[in-house]
Image: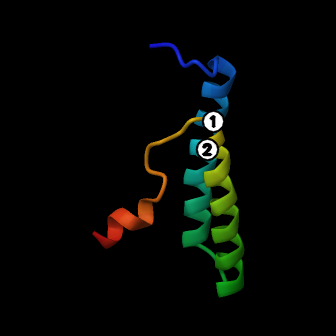
Amino acid sequence: MTNPLGSDVDDQRQRLVDLRSRLREERALSSTPAVDHALRLAEAYLQLSLGYCGHTEDLFPEETALA
């Protein structure tokens, strides 16, 4: 099925998903709570970008960890 937003948006979404994965890896290695907090904020903004690109999977992964 073709994405109504176009293939450019599909490509962007995939790059953002990859970036989020790398960001989470970096958070796991953060050297201070301040760095972790800054990276958490970056992830929040990244989530907004994913939403703008039509991404609906795994928007709030921390919620599934609590369930």
Image position of 47 (left or right of 64): right
Q: How far apart are marks 1 and 2 (CA)?
A: 5 Å
On the rendered image, what quadrant is the C terminus found in?
Answer: bottom left
Name the residue rendered at 59%, 72% in the picture. 29
Question: Circle 1 sits on which residue?
Answer: 53
Image position of 47 (left or right of 58): right
> Percent from the top left, x then y, of residue 28?
54, 71
CB under 8 Å between discs 1 and 2: yes
26 shown above or below 8: below
Name the residue rendered at 66%, 78% in the picture. 37
Which amino acid, by three-letter code, is at mark 2?
A: Leu
59 shown above or below 56: below
Image position of 6 (left or right of 28): right
Local packing at callout 2 (Cα closer than 10 Å; few below 14, some 14-19, many 20+) is many
> Percent from the top left, x then y, of residue 43?
63, 61
Quadrant of residue 1 in the image?
top left
Question: Circle 2 sits on which residue?
Answer: 50
Which amino acid, by three-letter code, is at mark 1?
A: Cys
Among all residues in the image, which is located at the extreme bottom?
A: 33
3 shown above or below 59: above
Which of the pair 51/15 is nearer the observer? 51
Quadrant of residue 16 in the image?
top right
Name the residue rendered at 66%, 27% in the picture. 9
> Percent from the top left, x then y, of residue 61?
43, 59
